Image (cartoon, grey):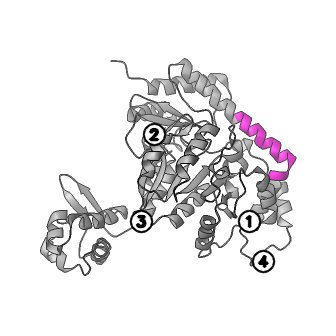
């Protein structure tokens, strides 16, 4: 069934991109436009409405974002159905084999054996004075006192949140409007790409090398006037690079004349072996650092802290006031205890060393087998392969799960897979077997 352009034009009350999208959403919700209905071409509907094809194309883009229509070359544009809840497609597809395969190297989750125990910290936090007072505290005094000495610059505002990606999401959401541009590293975190897709911004990729974002590529992206630049200063996932002092100075020089908000995603925080080189030391008025404590101190603490430019942090605080309002003071002071306790500090230091050794050992084993991997920091390895799909199938056939590299890219690039190292075996023989399988998957098949 195909919708007549003249009839459809009569159903549209406001011939703007938003008006067209709104009226089509109503028609699809009401069942007037049923799943499978073929929509008119962009040009034919634009002609009937007396608008430019770009206006209709923008409306179609909005409907595609909500997964209400689909476009392909042969069938044209067809109705899929009413809007549903957006899904983080890239993130949800990572680790699909994990529950079925013997060795799960897809999810970069911390090793539970390397996390500090929570018992004493929770007990100490539960005796904090003033608990259950209906006060919307941005950060507890104990937690601020614990983190402030470790912050690389003096923040104008503080806020405790429910995890690092919540911090990144809310900063982007409160900075950008649909259609705005945000510059990000290429490749970058799969969840970040999902977040930006849902927000409805245009992504401007910035190329990276072993020292972080490449200045020439950032300079080119800044010509598009992005409202924000999101990057990982250390422990980069998936590539494992860390930004050097010289590179940070070059990036700051490019960003200083702009109004671009700098969002620094410090995803592994205290587990990083690289020093924290922050643009906030040079650009405190336009930088916010997001530091997660999930991998270092426990995913179920659900805690991250943002600190930096006052206006950006305040926007996030205001948006949260519509929902949760504040982060549990019990959890905040539990983290404060862990950050201040010598025993917990020693556990985190041991974990940092153990992860670095696991990463280095697997990298060395792969190098011996002719599979070079770059990077010097983080909980993953970015492994070049001949063919991504073949590599994943080969790994799965040997009981190993990995993450496809394409999930971390905006543009098509050389094929890679991402290997998580946090829960790798300590047994040399087992590690050698895993390296054999990864090398087999990475190399071009014989013949």
Disc on res. 306:
none
Residue with the mark numbered 3? 178
The one nearer the camera, 60 or 144, is 144
Q: Within 10 angstroms of label 2, few (less than 14), some, or many (20 or more) residues?
A: many
Which dot, 1 or 4, sits closer to the camera?
A: 1
Real-space CA distance between mark 3 and mark 1, rounded to the nearest whole angstrom = 30 Å
Real-space CA distance between mark 2 and mark 4, rounded to the nearest whole angstrom = 47 Å
Which of disc 4 and disc 1 is earlier in sequence?
4
Residue with the mark numbered 1? 139
Which of disc 4 and disc 3 is earlier in sequence?
4
Real-space CA distance between mark 3 and mark 4, rounded to the nearest whole angstrom = 37 Å
Q: Which residues are magenta?
A: 339-354
Residue 408 in view:
no
Which of disc 1 and disc 3 is earlier in sequence?
1
The one nearer the camera, 47 or 98, is 47
Q: Within 10 angstroms of label 3, few (less than 14), some, or many (20 or more) residues?
A: some
Residue 45 position in % (x across, y down): 17, 69
Residue with the mark numbered 4? 133
Which of disc 2 and disc 3 is earlier in sequence?
3
Which dot, 3 or 2, sits closer to the camera?
A: 3
Instruction: Name above or below for residue 365 compared with residue 25.
Output: above
Residue with the mark numbered 2? 405
Instruction: Name above or below for residue 217 compared with residue 27.
Output: above
The residue at 40%/28% (across/down) is 386
């Amino acid at each position: 069934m195909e919708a007549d352009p003249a009839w459809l034009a009569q159903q549209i009350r406001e011939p703007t991109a938003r008006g067209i999208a709104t009226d089509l959403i109503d028609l699809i919700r009401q069942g007037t436009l049923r799943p499978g209905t073929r929509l008119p071409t962009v040009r034919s509907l634009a002609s009937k409405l007396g608008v430019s094809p770009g206006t209709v194309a923008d409306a179609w883009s909005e409907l595609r974002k909500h997964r209400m229509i689909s476009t392909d070359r042969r069938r044209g544009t067809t109705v899929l159905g009413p809007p549903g809840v957006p899904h983080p497609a890239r993130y949800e597809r990572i680790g699909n084999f994990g529950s079925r395969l013997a060795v799960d190297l897809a999810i970069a989750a911390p090793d539970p054996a390397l996390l500090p125990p929570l018992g004493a910290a929770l007990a100490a936090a539960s005796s904090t004075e003033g608990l259950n007072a209906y006060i919307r505290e941005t950060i507890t005094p104990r937690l601020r006192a614990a983190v402030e000495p470790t912050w690389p610059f003096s923040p104008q505002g503080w806020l405790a949140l429910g995890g690092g990606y919540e911090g990144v999401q809310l900063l982007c959401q409160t900075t950008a409007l649909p259609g705005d541009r945000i510059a990000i590293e290429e490749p970058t975190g799969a969840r970040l790409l999902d977040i930006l897709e849902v927000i409805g911004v245009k992504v401007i990729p910035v190329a990276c090398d072993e020292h972080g974002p490449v200045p020439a590529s950032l300079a080119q992206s800044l010509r598009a006037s992005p409202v924000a630049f999101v990057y990982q200063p250390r422990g980069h996932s998936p590539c494992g690079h860390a930004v050097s002092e010289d590179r940070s100075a070059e990036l700051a020089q490019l960003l200083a004349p702009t109004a671009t908000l700098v969002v620094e995603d410090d995803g592994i925080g205290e587990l990083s072996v690289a020093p924290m080189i922050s643009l906030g030391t040079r650009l405190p008025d336009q930088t916010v650092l997001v530091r997660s404590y999930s991998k270092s101190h426990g995913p179920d603490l659900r805690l991250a802290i943002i600190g930096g430019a006052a206006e950006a942090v305040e926007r996030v605080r205001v948006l949260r006031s519509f929902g949760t309002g504040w982060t549990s003071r019990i959890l905040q002071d539990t983290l404060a205890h862990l950050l201040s306790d010598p025993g917990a500090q020693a556990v985190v230091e041991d974990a940092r060393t153990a992860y670095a050794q696991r990463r280095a050992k697997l990298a060395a084993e792969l190098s011996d087998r002719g599979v070079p991997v770059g990077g010097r920091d983080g909980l993953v390895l970015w492994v070049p392969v001949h063919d991504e799909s073949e590599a994943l199938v080969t790994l799965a056939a040997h009981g190993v799960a990995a993450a496809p590299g394409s999930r971390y890219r905006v543009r098509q690039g050389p094929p890679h897979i991402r290997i998580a190292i946090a829960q790798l075996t300590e047994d040399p023989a087992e590690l050698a077997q895993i390296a054999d399988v990864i090398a087999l998957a990475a190399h071009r098949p014989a013949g």
